[in-house]
Image (tube, grey):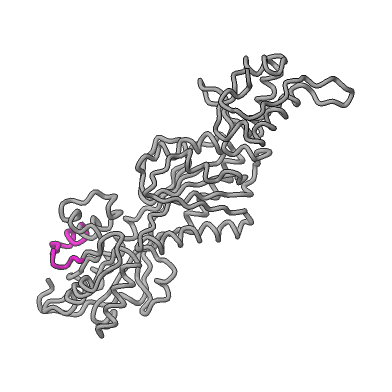
Amino acid sequence: MTLWPDDETETMSTATPKKRTNEKTLHQWVTDQILQDIRVGRLPLGKKLPSQEDLVGKFKVSVNTVRQSLATLERRGIIRKEHGRGSFVSLQSNRTEKSSELKSFGLIFERAGKPEDRPAEAEIVQAFVNVCREHQIRFTCVETDVDAHAGGRELIKALDGVSLDGVCVFLHTGDNAFERLEPLTREFVAPAAFFPAVQESPIPIDCVDIELRTGLQHLMKYLLAMGHRRIGFVGSHIGECLKGDPRRITGGRWQIYSETLAGAGIPVDPSFLVEIPYGQEPTARIERQVIDLVQRKKPVTALFSYNDWMARHVIQWLWQNDIHIPRDVSVTGMDDVSFSRHMVPALTTSACPYVKAAQTIIDLMQKRLTHHDQSIQRITIPSELIVRDSVGPAKQNKDPL
């Protein structure tokens, strides 16, 4: 009988070491034998170890010795125990010991990879880079494709060979969240999740979320306070929005736009809506639709853009058609990515505080490494209105609508 029946490679030695004055104890010897098989690949990551009974028979030692060895391996993070299932080689088994200080941090970043998502995705990763650099924490990032629908074990294996004190997974949606996140709670002392939308989750994992509603509400109310009543909407999923958009499609943007107008007694005008299909670069036809909103007999006085990426396109089209911002029309965005601060004019937007979110996640991990038994934390960070130069008072019309 081989120790690892699924493996055709050479099995480890079963000879018990002869006792010498300075020799290691038996349990240390058993520990070293198991470690050797992990290091040479006879026990790959995630593989289940033989039962205690099999180990006793293989090494010809007592049950107590085997238990001591397994306890040592678990304490060092080499193996993990799952209740009712046995012991498994940890996906972070290369770590030699557990740390009480966050010195190395891993980010598993799920990219949508669509043109409108790329600026914000780059901003999120850069936020973690900056926070880790400030605290002298080694940073490792592994990118995955949102369309691949990788499970939690596949996500964690992407970090094979990297020693980490804590790991965070950024998810675009909460779809299959349990499958994706549950393995982290067994593999890492300090796991965390970063959702882009508010989620209630039964998974015992620290979670940080950015709530979009607050900043968007302030943005729409600011437009109303500046006298705007004819406000256009430039975004994706217009058809779904008009039919009763599920929140996850637009992250709440459409709801805030339509609800704020309704609260001011202003009905949504379908002719004020311009769609840029999700995942596609805008076309000349879309540009003409936006310009028509501003040049028609009763023009819009402000354009509420789905995000900063779309707002940048809108501003470029307006300038190319000799339409002044904000004298002729005001423009807003959402995210507050770096280029929004350097546009002409600088963009008024709803900011997602990614640096604050990254700092919060790092703080949670440090606390969990120090106090393993602290209660699960779910922290929501509100978005913020950033007022710049792209919004001005509405042009006065005889007919406000």
The residue located at (60%, 41%) in the rendering is 369
Residue 266 point in image, percent of width and height: 14, 63
Task: Please identify the quarter of the rendering in which residue 228 is found.
Answer: bottom left
**Rendered view: 12 above or below 350:** above
Between 393 and 166, the residue placed more toward the observer is: 166
Residue 273 point in image, percent of width and height: 18, 65
Quarter of the image where the C terminus is located:
bottom left
Check residue 360 for magenta coloring.
no
Residue 354 point in image, percent of width and height: 45, 58
The residue located at (37%, 80%) in the rendering is 344
Q: How many marks?
A: 0
Check residue 262 for magenta coloring.
yes
Between 240 and 207, the residue placed more toward the observer is: 240
Residue extent of the magenta highlight: 259-274
**Rendered view: 324 above or below 221:** below
**Rendered view: 44 above or below 304:** above
Between 10 and 170, the residue placed more toward the observer is: 10
